[in-house]
Amino acid sequence: MTTTQDPRYIQLVEHLASVRHNANITQADLADAFDQAPSWVESAESRARPLDIVELFDWLTAIGYCHKTFFTELGWFTPDEDTPALPLRGEAIGDPRGVRVPMVWQGRIREVLLEGITREGYLWLETEICALYAQLNLPRPKLKNREAVARALELAINKFPRVNASDLFHHIVHRLYLREYTRTQADRSWQRAGIESLEPFVETRYAAKMVKRNVVVRWLARPADRNAAFAALDLPVKAARPPVALYGSIRGVEHLFGAIFVRPEDAATARALQEQGYVAYLLTLDAHSAPLPLGDLVNRGELGTQDAPTALRGAIEAGFTACYSYNSRTVTGGRINEATFDPKWDPLPLELDRAWAAFRASRSL
């Protein structure tokens, strides 16, 4: 039996053609990427000529499809058990409660229910976010990874403001990044880009609406900006400086009154701020689900309960003025509050108003 007649090879070629078709790329489009005639692609997909491994790699790159995902979907690749489940491209099943998204893990399919989302809305969002992430795979991307993730989250929340924001982040923004980003190792890249994306996102989400209330929400993108903003405060030398500064404005003059953090690990800096009379808020998406094979992929977070707190919850309770979790499944209590990005119910603007008024009164400003 020749290679082109092997059932495994036939499965591979058919899946490759399906991937190209689902990406709305014609044979002519793909051939153009390699300065070839359309017949060059057609002959491979019809198995008239064998496709070698280097060609396969280059084709997937040109299509913009994750190499690991491709082989995982074939059931050929067996990753480590902590490898995340990834959504199948262009697949979503309508459900009375929302949409069920098929996730592939080690060649097996597991559906995840996203409540409050329509099938059409999910597919639109997948297309838009994939287009954003595709820019990161260019030789010289104009977007930084954290900025692309922040824009993806903003797209998702604007599309579905009443849906659990943590689910949007965890199951869509995060998993699509792992599937689509190919320039470097996606899971390692996400460890930094995922958390750092919340910093510009917070500014985008709140700056315009809060400036009308004489509160300035400013993302300090560079370490030098952070050091300058908090230079007058007595903060631990090696502690991370807050990524988002809060200012109150009086007749055009800004007065620092606190900060917003996105990492629970910054609790020491937050405590130091509070000891000097400033507020220190933590905003978290508390996004975590138990992975397969033992987990069910339900995004319950990782803060535990008041009766059975995790170490992370303990650090939050001891370190911050208040924590706002945008995961509706987070067990609230103590300093941990439930929040939503729905403008009608988002509690943060009123909290910032209150904090600025209290700071202004305490300093007789």
Image (cartoon, rainbow, N blue to C red):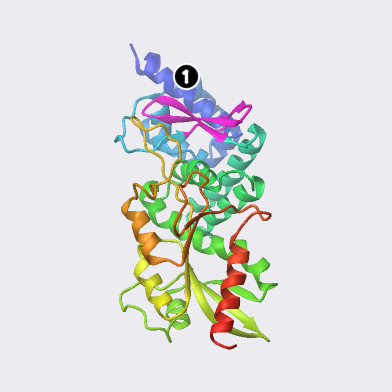
54 drawn magenta: no
Above or below, 126 relative to 97: below
Q: Nearer the viewer, residue 278 or 18?
A: 278
Question: Where does the C terminus fall, quadrant-wise?
Answer: bottom right
Q: Residues within 10 Å of mark 1 (few under 14, many from 20)?
A: few
Q: Which residues are magenta?
A: 87-114
Marks counted in the figure total 1
Residue 114 occupies which quadrant of the picture? top right
Left or right of 42, for residue 109 = left
The residue indicated by pointer 1 is: 48
Q: Which residue is depicted at the point 42% across and 66% down?
A: 320
Q: Position of residue 131 (x, y in %)?
A: 58, 46
In-image side of 268 versus 87 (left or right): left
- Residue toward you, 223 or 164: 164
- Type of amino acid at the residue the image marks with label 1: Ala
What SS does tag 1 mark? loop
Looking at the image, which is closer to me, 264 or 55?
264
